[in-house]
Amino acid sequence: MRRTNALLAVVGTMLLCACSAATSPDPNAIKGKFDIGGRLLYIECSGSGTPTVVMDAGLGNSHDTWKSVAPAVSKLTRTCTYDRANRGTSDAAPMPRTSAEVVADLRALLKAAAIPPPYVLVGHSFAGGTMRLFAAEHPGDVAGMVLVDPTPTTFLEGECAIVDAALCATLRGGFAPGKNPEGLDFLKSGPEVDGAGPLPAIPLIVLAATNHRQQAITDPAIEKQIDAFWQAEEAKLAASVPGGKMTVITSGHDIQLLQPAAVIDALTSVLASIRPRAS
């Protein structure tokens, strides 16, 4: 009996230790809201190492859009996702807004949360422009980029050149600041991004989707032309940086949700190309 009790005590101690180790918090984790000057923005980070991967979501999405990507990347290096103003649990901000205001918010958030550069920037859709603007304005802070089916800065003009006038008016109306939940102004944001100057010479991978289906467009031939337009613009973007790469992914627009492994692979490649130079 005494021997049995001793054995149970040992097993109990082992289980307690295992449970304690499994539930111990990540000492590098951040999860909460930070004041960026009268407004609070939400951010969460996990993992350790440098550079820090910072992910920005597409129009209308929150940080949860990276739920199939961020955990895997956080095993490679510190990884952060956040909610822009007017999304998720972040505070509201005056609308309409442009990419320049989004970049200013993100810069302030990273400073408030004490997350220093260098950064690998990841942007999906509209946030592809946001991250381009960030990198062009602060090249010394950015070590690499992965752009996930980034929206061309001239996508409304490009798509309107393909469709008829009535459908063009529908597209423009659908993307007006008052028609999206963040009040983002595409027509003003595009020139901000294009006017900021070239991207720095950093590792860049652009992931291009094969399907940009939109509710207002029902003609398969027009859909194919729009897909070709997006891929041509994304190829130009990749080519604007020495050694930049574009990879076509058989997927809809939300590659991070539909083909998350492609985003993880791209980030793994970018990180691998950065770290030997830093060592």
Image (cartoon, rainbow, N blue to C red):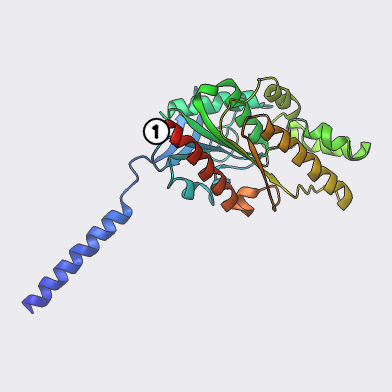
Q: Nearer the viewer, residue 9 or 266?
A: 266
Q: Residue at x 38, y 40 (%)?
A: 48
- Please tell me how many numbered marks the rendered image carries: 1
The N terminus, quarter of image: bottom left
Q: Is 50 displayed left or right of 167 in the figure? A: left
Residue 51 visible in image:
no
Tag 1: amino acid: Ser
Using the image, determine if residue 199 lies above or below residue 175.
above
Q: Is 117 displayed left or right of 173 in the figure? A: left
Q: Nearer the viewer, residue 83 or 274?
A: 274
Using the image, determine if residue 141 lies above or below residue 247.
above
Identify the secondary structure beneath mark 1: loop
Residue 3 coordinates in the image, percent (x, y): 8, 76
Residue 219 coordinates in the image, percent (x, y): 89, 51
Q: Residues within 10 Å of mark 1 (few under 14, many from 20)?
A: few
Residue 46 coordinates in the image, percent (x, y): 42, 43
Please identify the quarter of the rendering in which residue 164 is found: top right
Residue 143 visible in image:
yes
Using the image, determine if residue 140 lies above or below residue 32.
above
The C terminus, quarter of image: top left
Q: Residue at x 64, y 49 (%)?
A: 255
Q: Residue at x 27, y 55 (%)?
A: 20
Q: Is 255 displayed left or right of 109 in the figure? A: right
Q: Is 181 displayed left or right of 42 in the figure? A: right
Residue 67 coordinates in the image, percent (x, y): 53, 49
Please identify the quarter of the rendering in which residue 105 is found: top right
Give the residue pinned by disc 1: 279
Residue farthest to the left, as pictured: 2
